[in-house]
Image (tube, rainbow, N blue to C red):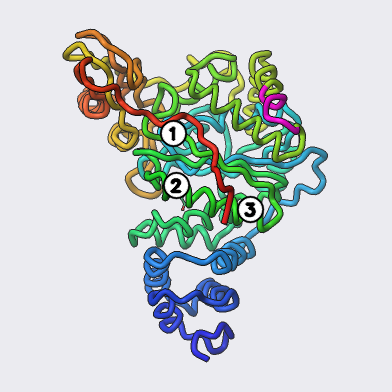
Amino acid sequence: LLGSGSPERLIPARVIERKRNGAVLEAQEMRSFFLRYLEGDVQEQQMAAFLMAVYFQGLAPEELDALVDVMLESGERLDLSGLPRPAVDKHSTGGVGDKVSLALAPLAGELGLSVPMIAGRGLGHTGGTLDKLSAIPGFRTDLEVPDFVRIVNRVGCGIIGQTAKIAPLDRRLYALRDVTGTVSSIPLIAASIMSKKLAEDLVGLVLDVKVGEGAFIADEPGATELARTLVGIGERRGVRTKALMTAMDRPLGRTVGNALEVSEALECLRGGGPPDLRELVLRLAAEMLLVGGVETNVKGALESAVRALDSGRALDRFRRLVEAQGGDPAVVDDPGLLPRAPRTAELRSQGAGVVRECTPTRLGYGLTELGGGRSRLGDSIDVSVGFVLHVEVGQPVARGESLGTVHAANDAGLAVGLEVLGRAISVGGADEPPPRLRPLITELTEPYV
Ligand code: URA
């Protein structure tokens, strides 16, 4: 009867041992274990040991569902039943230079969806939408849920942070994973992401699962399993869930750094910006329209998205979003009003050749070194610093050609930034075989387990 799932009889050490030995726990047993943790009967060190057992043994779908259920039940959920338009969101598993949400939320809002986006801060080497938005003077992401729902209803989209009340079990587990080497576990990442997304009361969800050097799960089989696990959780709960695998073997777009990325997202909303950013924003918008039931084929959905982006209607929607959340809307028309780093310097190529590599993790951690990301929870960040890339992988460069610009707070930052950029971008001989890059977007062939 030990570990049988009856709350009275549950013995934490026995549950941990069984998971450690590879048993599939009963749903009730998982439930009780996590409920008892919330009540303080299962200790932090016991949960840490359990998470490590999960890290090595994984979770069966029924165990995963039980965990997601408790995470969801532990907190508040949005009630969007009063909204006239289908609620659909997008979530990325985390990347470098990924400013997609800033352009996508207003675009999808413009296209007839409600987008109630609960976004995150930067994590490890990856950036976070909340940090990027904090570059817009006055923009508030700490709204109460009823105010947030009102904004989503009025504007078609809204972006807030995970409040203390949304999936608090995830918050506690996340903090524990962060300090126990158990972040990069596929089922734990999947449960964590989906507990927040399912709290949004969605009809449909599109997942942007990063793959490549800068992704949390970098290898293709692992990223594919993560994608399928995420889709499985959503689909089993009746949320139409679609995953795309997208390239993170190089940064997305040409900027890394919070204010610089807002500026680039604004270019995209004006119908310009780097082609990879534009392509991904348009495709994700099209997929959101499909899972939301607003469009029935990807071609038509893409055409609607292109029209809304190129006409400036999505940009107008972004201006309304900024205004509704307390930000200065003047920034939308004049990105020069965004915080700017006082010092800049360019890195020049030491020889002629071809750009072979631009490694996202180096730039991501480099941003933290410049002060634009956190190395400890609660650190404040400098939103103005970062990198602007002038070249992309595969491009020929001449000796002395500019490879990128560092934006820093002072001379010491410039020196650090130039070194980071020099290590991130490598230029090789033109006679070497061309560098291999992942396609920007790939579909999952078998949708979910
Ligand atoms: N994002 C999350 O919300 N949770 C994880 O575990 C990883 C990325």
Q: Are marks 3 and 2 in contact (CB under 8 Å)?
A: no
* Residue 300 part of the magenta-drawn span: yes
Pointer 1 or 3: first along the chain: 3
Q: Earlier in the sequence, mark 3 or mark 2?
A: 2
Instruction: Indicate the quadrant where residue 210 lies.
Output: top left
Residue 47 falls in image quadrant: bottom left
The outermost residue toward the bottom is 1
Element under disc 3: helix
- Would you place residue 82 above or below residue 16 in this image? above
Q: Residue at x 64, y 41 (%)?
A: 89
- Any part of residue 160 in sight: no
Residue 239, percent across and down?
A: 69, 50
Which x, y percent locates residue 359?
31, 32
- Name the mark on residue 247: 1
| Amino acid type of the residue that numbered disc 2 sits on in the rendered structure | Ala
- Give the amino acid type for the residue marked by disc 3 in the picture: Gly
Query: Quick one: 244 or 221, which is closer to the camera?
Result: 221
**Is 138 in the magenta?**
no
Label ID, residue 223: 2
Q: Secondary structure at mark 1?
A: strand
* Magenta stretch bounds: 296-302
Query: Which label sits on residue 234?
Result: 3
